[in-house]
Amino acid sequence: MNSENPNNSSGAPVDPTEHTQGAETTLPRTLPKKRAGGKASPRTRAREFAVQALYQFIVGKNIPGDVDQFTRGLSGFNKADSVHYDLLLYGASEQSKELDALIEPFLDRPFAEISPIERSVMWIGAYELKHCIDVPSKVVINECIELAKEFGGTDGHKYVNAVLNGLAHQLRAQEMKPRSSV
């Protein structure tokens, strides 16, 4: 595993749990076992692994199949919803340009200044808001805020929240309307 070069010219997937010199951020060695209210759901775990996989896709410039194989070998993957993980990894990586185009109007800086973790989290959120209509927008946003808190920079979750909230109002306007009390 090449932990000196975040671009990883060897072609092997970058392990986001190892420190990579020059990378904007690193992920913890193990995934969080629980959220504030108890055990993480299989979908929550799928999102956690998808963040790691998308990080490898962005920083290591690895192909999704290699990233997938590496990520499935990580401890605890068996507790994740592998179908949802597949949707997020392959969907976000294949549609990265389209997701960037959806996200960009809500940014206050260029993508080059966004950490790969926050970008990965925003891709997950944008993908779910667009394609996973069975997941309420508030759940998508909350899950992404938690991912950004766990893996991202100090205030990255606030930025992710603002971007995804704006995107949710665009993609799911009807769902985001305040309910009137009658």
Image (cartoon, grey):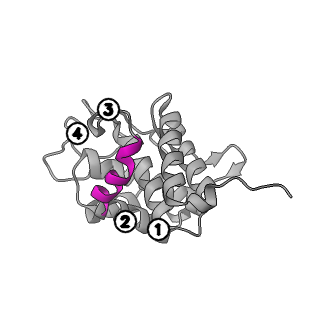
Identify the residue under disc 4: 6
Marked residue nearer the N-terminal end (3 or 2):
3
Marked residue nearer the N-terminal end (2 or 1):
2
Marked residue nearer the N-terminal end (1 or 4):
4
Q: Give the range drawn in magenta.
A: 95-106
- Name the amino acid type tagged 3: Glu
Asked if residue 4 shows in the view, the reply is yes
Query: How far apart, in angstroms, are the residues tagged by discs 2 and 1?
Result: 9 Å
Query: How far apart, in angstroms, are the residues tagged by discs 3 and 4?
Result: 9 Å
Q: Specify the farthest residue to the right.
A: 182
x and y percent of residue 77 in the render?
Answer: 48, 60
Determine the residue positioned at 44% across, 55% down.
Answer: 126
Q: Is mark 2 on a helix, strand or loop?
A: helix
- Name the amino acid type tagged 1: His
Which of label 2 and label 4 is nearer to you? Answer: 2
- Name the amino acid type tagged 4: Pro
Identify the residue under disc 3: 24
